[in-house]
Amino acid sequence: MAAMTRTGGSTGRITRRRARTRANLLAAAFSVFAAKGFGHVSIEEICETAGYSRGAFYSNFSSLDELFFALYEERAELIARQVAEALAQDGPDLDVPAAVDRVTAVLLLDRDWLLVKTDFLVHAARDPEVARALLEHRAGLRGAIAERLARAQGHTPLPAVLGDVDSAAHAVVAAYDGVTTRLLLDRDVAGARAWLKQLLTALLTEGSAEPAPRGRE
């Protein structure tokens, strides 16, 4: 691992080239998985899309499963960062409506990603080891939300129905899961953001005066 930290000389050049190859393979895999679904894609197809050989693939990933998880991990970390940054802007006093506005404005609601994520959930459900890793990532996302709610709770009490901050974080993630499931079917990104805002506002305050978007479940 020490060689990976060097920035000069030939090792630095190799490291940068390998990082670029890895990124290109992930991007190619994302497009192919979104179009065909995991289980219908071969390593050769990903390499062809990225313009690399099988050797380039195996120098970065040991299997299709490992690549798939790296792809999920990349997007999961982005979502966790988006939520944490949106919730961190108010200082100790959490302005819930403003924070919800920020979260729903920036949160990743990309249908191709949701297709890949859904494939990954199904795959994980059949593989206990992958399921454990996925649960750890989901716990990290909930933890980031719970931590921010806990820091604000003394200044901005949560609705009593939610109980503690861990329960509130579970509710926030469940709302996101529900909204994105519907988005897979109706392809209405603007509607999904509006509905997510409605749900989060209702969850994190005593209620919302705004009516729910019409025609959604």
Image (cartoon, grey):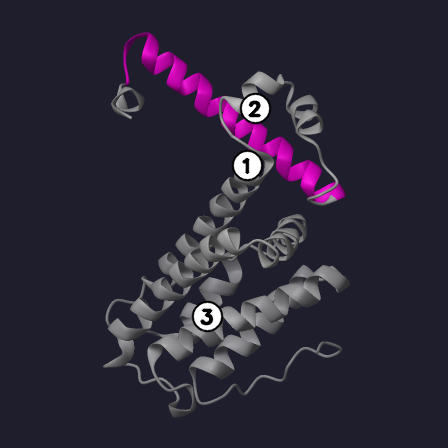
Q: Which mark is residue 57?
A: 2
Q: Nearer the viewer, residue 210 or 172?
A: 172
Q: Nearer the viewer, residue 213 or 17?
A: 17
Relative vertical location of residue 14 with respect to residue 96 in this rendering, above or below = above
Do the residues under discs 1 and 2 have CB atoms within 8 angstroms?
yes
User: Residue beneath label 1, please?
Assistant: 67
Specify few, some or many for label 1: CA neighbours under 10 Å numbering under 14, 14-19, or 20 or more.
Answer: many
Which amino acid, mark 3?
A: Val
* C-alpha separation, residue under disc 1 versus residue under disc 3: 33 Å
Which amino acid, mark 1?
A: Leu
Q: Would residue 144 appear left or right of 110 to someone viewing this image? A: left
Q: Would residue 179 appear left or right of 70 to someone viewing this image? A: right
Which amino acid, mark 2?
A: Phe
Specify few, some or many for label 3: CA neighbours under 10 Å numbering under 14, 14-19, or 20 or more.
Answer: many
Tell me the residue at 55%/36% (across/down): 67
Asked whether the viewer can see residue 93, the reply is no
User: Which stretch appears magenta?
Assistant: 7-36
Q: Position of residue 187 (x, y in %)?
A: 74, 59
Disc 1, SS: helix
Which label sits in the foreground, 1 or 3?
1
Secondary structure predominantly adopted by residues drawn in magenta: helix
User: Residue beneath label 3, please?
Assistant: 100
